[in-house]
Image (cartoon, rainbow, N blue to C red):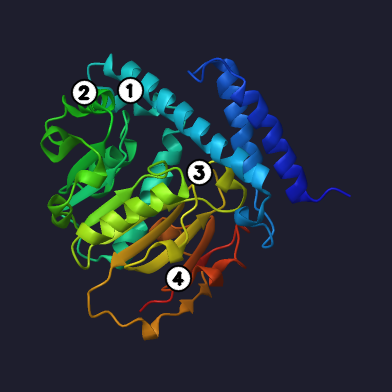
Amino acid sequence: MVTEEEALIQKVVDLYEQISGLESLKPCKHVDTLFTELVVTCMPPTSPNFHINSLSNPVQQMRSNLIRLCGQAESLLESHFSDLLANFDYPLHHLHLFPYFSNYLKLSLLEFSILRRHCPVLPSSVAFVGSGPLPLTSIVLATRHLPSTSFHNYDLDPLANSQASKLVSVDADLKTRMVFHTCDIMKVTEELKEYEVVFLAALVGMEKEEKLRVIEHLCEFMAEGACLMVRSAHGGRAFLYPVVEECDLVGFEVLSVFHPSDEVINSVIIARKKKKDHDDDDDCLKIVGDDNHENGIENGVVVHNKQCCDHIHGFNNHGGMIEELAE
């Protein structure tokens, strides 16, 4: 009898073999169909016993390769639509043409809701690391949730930044609040102290070691008390994006973790850089069931955790809602 997890792994392996055999990952009907099937395959909740880290070495290697292919395809898709949008007189009026725009609306609302809960004073300046050619998170947050905040977008690719800046250059407000930096975030030091919040894109540091180095660097140079918003993945969705666990966030106090169970793929972790005299003795896990639709947090699981990633492995995407206890 084949288990659900075994069936999931076999289906993902089959799709990986098809995707890895493609001559190009540029957007087209066949490429779009394969990646849509992959996402749909990975979305359903898995059992609490399913852990990516327990997979065999060949499957782990396949997953690593697949995440890189997903990253390449995502970048090409965003570049394609950024160029398409740039042809309009006012590109921001046509963002809905991007096929996953509704997902970004939901993800941005989720991240803003979590941020507002833990940071009552809205930030005046934030950084987004890995903004890409179509910086939808920054645009949505700036226009819908943080209308007075400056956004500093970091990306390695000068072409991506050029494409992104064209989209906001015709907006009188955004062109003054959106800044694009072409550089390696690992070379950004003292500037990081200027940001009250740093968003870390899911595909920055696709290998575990890369991700940990980035997090360590951010911890070294971010201001004490500043918040780090990290995108991760959970359950079967970890075949699509790298996983960040609470214990990876050394030097940060993990405030909450949210695992969506709808079409929003990424999990969201918010953490605060610890002060040097921070006492870990009170760190604990707190959860309570509740409904929180009005705050934009729904269709998933919120785990309020201040330490120890091992404590959350029993929780998964069952479609319910678990709200953080107020501190």
Position of residue 120 measured from the top left corner of the image (x, y, whole percent): 24, 66
Quadrant of the rendered image containing residue 16: top right
**Which type of secondary structure does the marked residue at label 1 adopt?**
helix
What residue sits 41% from the left and 34% below the top?
101
Instruction: Name the element at disc 4.
Output: strand
| Label pair 2/1, CB-CB below 8 angstroms | yes
The image's mark for residue 304 is 4
The residue shown at (59%, 62%) is 320
Label 1 sits on residue = 82
Q: Which residue is mark 3?
A: 241
Tell me: 258 left or right of 154. Answer: right
Q: Nearer the viewer, mark 1 or mark 3?
A: 3
Residue 327 visible in the current orientation: yes
Q: Is residue 256 above or below residue 27?
A: below
Relative to 88, 66 lies left or right: right
Marks 4/1: CA distance?
A: 37 Å
Number of other residues with Cα within 10 Å of mark 4, as a class: few under 14, some 14 to 19, many 20 or more:
many
The amino acid type of the residue labelled 1 equals: Ser
